[in-house]
Image (tube, rainbow, N blue to C red):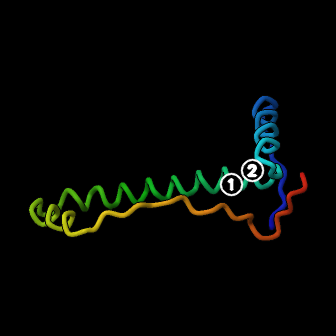
Amino acid sequence: MMKTAIFIPDPIFEEAEKLAQQRGISRSQLYTEALQKLLDEEVTAQLNRVYEGLAAQSDPVLARMQTLSIEPEVWEEAPRRKPAGVSRAKR
């Protein structure tokens, strides 16, 4: 685990404190989850840009056949796990 100091505007810090309390998690865990979500979104956006270009190059009939051959799936949100080494105590 990396310990760091950051500067956050007071109104954002206060809202984050309220949210962490409402969720029953530490400030560190809240910030970790928020950053992980942002990083995941960035990776997804990059992959979408890559595959967007590839989709434009594919044969439309073949692409439609491939889409129709895939069974529909129901995705459920994975249960949240506490990052290793993070306690529930406020830091």
User: Residue 38, position in %: x, y?
Assistant: 59, 51
Numbered mark located on residue 64 in the image: none
User: Residue 75, position in %: x, y?
Assistant: 45, 61
Q: Residues within 10 Å of mark 1 (few under 14, many from 20)?
A: some
User: Residue 52, position in %: x, y?
Assistant: 29, 55
Instruction: Give 48 or 26, whichever is nearer the viewer.
Output: 26
Residue, x 72% and y 55% (percent of image)?
A: 32
The residue that label 2 is drawn on is 30
Q: Amino acid at mark 1?
A: Glu
Locate the N terminus and report the quarter of the image it occupies.
bottom right
Residue, x 50% and y 60% (percent of image)?
A: 76
Instruction: Give 40 or 90, whichever is nearer the viewer.
Output: 90
Apparent side of residue 67 relative to residue 1 in the rendered image (left or right): left
Q: Are marks 1 and 2 in contact (CB under 8 Å)?
A: yes
Q: Amino acid at mark 2?
A: Leu
Residue, x 86% and y 62% (percent of image)?
A: 87
Task: Point out the residue furthest to the top here.
Answer: 11
Residue, x 66% and y 61% (percent of image)?
A: 80
Apparent side of residue 69 relative to residue 3 in the rendered image (left or right): left
The residue that label 1 is drawn on is 33
Apparent side of residue 72 relative to residue 82 in the rendered image (left or right): left
Apparent side of residue 68 relative to residue 5 in the rendered image (left or right): left
Q: Quadrant of residue 19?
A: top right
Secondary structure beneath disc 2? helix
Q: Residues within 10 Å of mark 2 (few under 14, many from 20)?
A: some
